[in-house]
Image (spheres, helix red, strand yellow):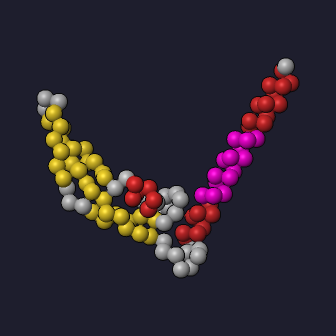
Amino acid sequence: MNSLLQRLRRILLYAVALLGLLTGLVYLGDYVSIRYRIPHNRAQFGSVTVNQLYVIHEKPNKVEYQLAPSVGETCVYSLFPHMGYPPCWYLSRHSEQRIEI
């Protein structure tokens, strides 16, 4: 029984290590494709219009909302965030930002 648990633990450890390695390789490939513009005809950066909303907390547990002007935010065409910019697929799905005041 003890041998079986050790074998399962070893298999689980290898599976987690393999998953970490694959994730790292995908991230590295994503970074290289953005950094060196692979393929060459693909744009690296884009822009998404983000609607901003001020959330103002008032004294007796009341909240007031005020619309702020929309802002064009720079994003990167990739799977993961790179160079300080979020991916465009994520930013387009989360195009409303709340600013707590």
Q: Quadrant of residue 69?
A: bottom left
Quarter of the rendering occupied by the N terminus: top right
* Number of disc labels: 0
Give coordinates of residue 8: x percent, y percent.
79, 30
Specify whether residue 84 is in view.
Answer: no
| Magenta stretch: dominant secondary structure | helix
Quarter of the rendering occupied by the C terminus: top left
Q: Residue at x 69, y 51 (%)?
A: 21
Specify whether residue 49 is in view.
Answer: yes
Give coordinates of residue 32: x percent, y percent.
60, 67
84 and 42: which one is in front? 42
Which residue reaches farthest top? 1
- Vertical relation: 32 (above or below) 97: below
Whether residue 27 sits left or right of residue 50 in the image: it is: right
Question: What segment carries the magenta color?
Answer: 14-27
Does residue 61 belong to the magenta stretch?
A: no
Q: Residue at x 42, y 64 (%)?
A: 75
Whether residue 83 sits left or right of residue 64 in the image: it is: right
Q: Quadrant of residue 33?
A: bottom right
Q: Residue at x 53, y 80 (%)?
A: 41
Whether residue 48 sits left or right of residue 10 in the image: it is: left
Which residue reaches farthest bottom? 41
Give coordinates of residue 68: x percent, y percent.
19, 56
Give coordinates of residue 34: x percent, y percent.
54, 69
- Vertical relation: 23 (above or below) 85: above
Q: Residue at x 34, y 56 (%)?
A: 95
- Vertical relation: 4 (above or below) 49: above
